Each structure stands twice: as C-alpha cells, then as structure tokens.
C-alpha cells in the first residue's frame, strides 16, 4: 500500500506539474494588468540577489534575525544579509534540494529529493548533521521548540531533535490513491504543529513528543472520478486568536477552534495556493486567482477581488495594512486589506513567483522561479 501511494503521489505530481506549465490547457486565461485603483506609493526594489533556480519546487526563503536563507533545486543553500543582500555563505549538498529551507537560531535545515534532512550552521554554512528519512521531502522543514518538524512524500510527519537530527517521533497517515504534491509546511504555534493532509484533513500535533491532539475534516472528497475526488490541503494553515484555518483544493475554506478542532465555519472554496489571517478576516487566493476576505468569526464574505484572475497568484501575506501576492509573470501586487482594492505593483524578473512573499520588518522578501531573491520596500 505504501508503494502504491508513493507511486500515485509521484505520477500525479508529474501530471500536475505538466498541466501547470503547459502553454495549452483548460485553465482560465490570465487577466491583463489593470490600472491601480487606489495608489498609495511605489513598491521599489531595495536589493536583488541570486539564490539559484527553484524549477518545479516551491521554495520558501527563511529569515531569522539579520540572515536570509534561500534554497535552490540544484542543492545550493545561500545566506544573505537581510539589510543589504550581501551573500554571507553558500553551500552545495551532494543531493538536490526539494523541500526548501528553514533557518532559526543557529541552524539552517533543508530537505532533499533523496529523503535526507540536512542541517548547517546559520552563520557559517558548516554542516552539523544529516538524517535519512527515506522519502522525498518537498515541504520546507520547520524549526520550533527544540524540534525540526518534517513531512515526507509518503504521508509521514517527523519530529527530529534539533541538536543532532535524531528521530524523536513520527506520525503516519494513510493517503488516497491520487493526491497533489504537497508543498505545505507545518504551522507551529505555542508548541503545536498544525498540518494539512491529503483527503482534506487537518491534524494538530504536539511538537515535543508527537502526540496527536486532534484531527478534523476541512473538506470531504466528492465526485465521480478519482480526479474529481481530490480534496487535499496543500497549503499552510494559519493561526490567530484561538482560530486555526485551512483551505482544500476542490474543497472548502474552514476555521476551527485551535484548542480542540471544533469546526467554527466553512465555505465552498477551492485553493492550492493558500490563505492569510488577521484579527478580523481570513484572506484566500482561490483556484481561479481571485482574492476574497471572509470574516474570521463567522465566515461572512467581506469582499472579493477578481481583477487578478488567471494570473496564478500565490497565497496572500499581510504586509501592514495591505495584502501582498505574487503572480506567474513575476509581478508583486499590493491590495488594501480593508476592501481588496489594488494599491501598488512592481515587476521582478518575469519568472513565476511560486510562493507568498515573506515579511521582514518593513520589507517584502520575494523569491522567483529563476532563483532571484528580492527585497521590496514601499516608498
């Protein structure tokens, strides 16, 4: 059964990549860029650096203190000064990276397509340890509470000792015959890892010992064919104010009580990109590329922005009073979180922005598919 699941995972992953990159498909044609309706300034490039090609993977850069770390499919791991973009170190493991990077404290951790987890010194790039888990790692690891939380392509979630890479715990969940490639890292808040799974499930795991605290259903499979029944959570969950929210492809966006997994509300939304949350709303990029805001407490639709449909948007990220998203042509857009109006835009290198920008103080950090890393500031 494990071999069957892994084979299906790889085959559908290949299918998904082909359809996503094909010039002829059934996806919605991209909307032309429209005029900024509510300009609030210019989104300018503060610095640019080369981090190596991401190819088909979705690599999230990682920031801790003044060090930005990025990964490349070739296996290259680069460290940059967050303020200037100056390269601090570069290392190239024997195997290519597939799971992005995580940097926190003294460590930088990355996953490979051969199932290895590699750890390096965050300031020096010196190798600290390596742990073999056996299956491809395509989600960025997460470092928290003395553990490195890693998910593998065969449906397992591991907790490794951060000091030496020893496996402390693992959680295994069965997977449907056909699934999407899942690039979503765990979201760790107050010692709990919230992990979205194939089959539309969300599980809460104690980071220290791997105890399953609860498991809830974001969306149930439905449809006549295996493709129609895919309803996987393939983006990071978000947590705020006692709520944890997640969204499933061909499924729903749903919010739960973080304490026990009780469903608070759910709405029919399909997304493989992801969502963001603040004190008022949950913001979702849906499968058509529209952005919508739902009231966090009850799920009421607050606004919907359709002018970016078909542009294969990333998940949104909160940037002060605004939301930032990247698109398939390398543009980064800012929207007013209050009403969804477009307020600013800038171009990068014309290659896809595959993952949501990350926020560091008053800067947006963006990594493109070609490997360029940008620091953007609103002037």
Image (tube, rainbow, N blue to C red):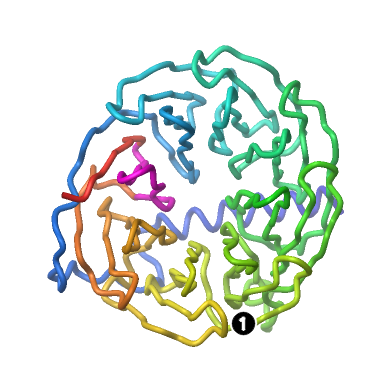
In the image, residue 261 lies at what x, y percent? Answer: 75, 70
In the image, residue 136 sits, relative to residue 116, either above or below, namely below
In the image, residue 22 lies at what x, y percent? Answer: 39, 57
Residue 109 in the figure: left or right of residue 292: right
Q: Is residue 178 magenta?
A: no
- For the point 39% across and 29% down, the residue is 52
Which element type, helix, strand or loop, lies under badge 1? strand
How many numbered discs, if any? 1
In the image, residue 104 sits, relative to residue 272, either above or below, namely above
Q: Is residue 354 magenta?
A: yes
| Res. 376 image quadrant | top left
In the image, residue 270 lies at what x, y percent? Answer: 53, 75
- For the point 58% across and 27% down, the residue is 105
Quickly name the residue at label 1: 266
- For the point 27% across and 54% down, the residue is 332
**Crowding near pointer 1: few (<14 within 10 Å), some, many (20+)?**
many
Taking depth in this image into account, of 164 and 1 the one nearest to the observer is 164
- For the point 70% across and 18% down, the residue is 129
In the image, residue 102 sits, relative to residue 267, either above or below, namely above
Please provide the residue range marked out in magenta: 353-370
Taking depth in this image into account, of 94 and 144 the one nearest to the observer is 144
Quadrant location, the N terminus: bottom right
Taking depth in this image into account, of 28 and 218 the one nearest to the observer is 218
In the image, residue 374 lies at what x, y percent? Answer: 29, 38
């Amino acid at each position: 059964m494990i071999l069957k699941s892994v084979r299906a995972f790889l085959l559908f992953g290949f299918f998904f990549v082909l359809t996503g990159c094909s010039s002829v498909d059934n996806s919605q044609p991209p909307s032309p860029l429209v005029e900024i309706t509510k300009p609030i300034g210019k989104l300018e490039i503060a610095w640019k650096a080369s981090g190596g090609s991401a190819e088909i993977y979705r690599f999230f850069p990682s920031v801790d203190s003044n060090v930005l770390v990025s990964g490349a499919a070739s296996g290259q791991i680069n460290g940059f000064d967050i303020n200037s973009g100056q390269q601090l170190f570069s290392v190239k493991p024997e195997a290519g990276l597939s799971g992005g990077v995580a940097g926190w404290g003294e460590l930088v951790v990355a996953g490979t397509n051969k199932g290895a987890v590699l750890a390096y010194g965050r300031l020096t790039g010196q190798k600290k340890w390596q742990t073999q888990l056996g299956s491809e790692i395509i989600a960025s690891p997460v470092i928290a509470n003395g553990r490195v939380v890693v998910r593998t392509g065969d449906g397992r979630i591991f907790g490794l000792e951060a000091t030496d890479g020893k496996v402390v715990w693992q959680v295994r969940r069965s997977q449907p015959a056909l699934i999407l490639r899942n690039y979503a890292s765990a979201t760790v808040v107050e010692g709990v890892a919230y992990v979205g799974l194939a089959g539309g499930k969300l599980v809460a795991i104690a980071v220290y010992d791997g105890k399953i605290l609860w498991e809830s259903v974001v969306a149930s499979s439905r449809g006549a064919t295996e493709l129609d029944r895919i309803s996987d959570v393939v983006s990071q969950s978000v947590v705020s104010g006692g709520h944890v929210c997640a969204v499933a492809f061909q499924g729903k966006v749903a919010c739960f009580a973080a304490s026990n997994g009780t469903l608070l509300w759910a709405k029919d939304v399909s997304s493989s990109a992801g969502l963001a949350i603040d004190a008022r709303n949950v913001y979702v990029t849906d499968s058509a590329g529209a952005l919508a805001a739902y009231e966090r407490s009850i799920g009421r639709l607050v606004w919907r922005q359709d002018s970016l449909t078909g542009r294969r948007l990333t998940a949104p990220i909160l940037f002060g009073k605004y939301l930032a998203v990247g698109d398939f042509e390398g543009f980064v857009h800012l929207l007013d979180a209050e009403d969804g109006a477009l307020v600013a835009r800038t171009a990068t290198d014309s290659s896809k922005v595959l993952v949501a920008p990350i926020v560091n103080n008053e800067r947006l950090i963006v990594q493109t598919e070609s490997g360029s890393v940008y620091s953007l500031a609103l002037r």
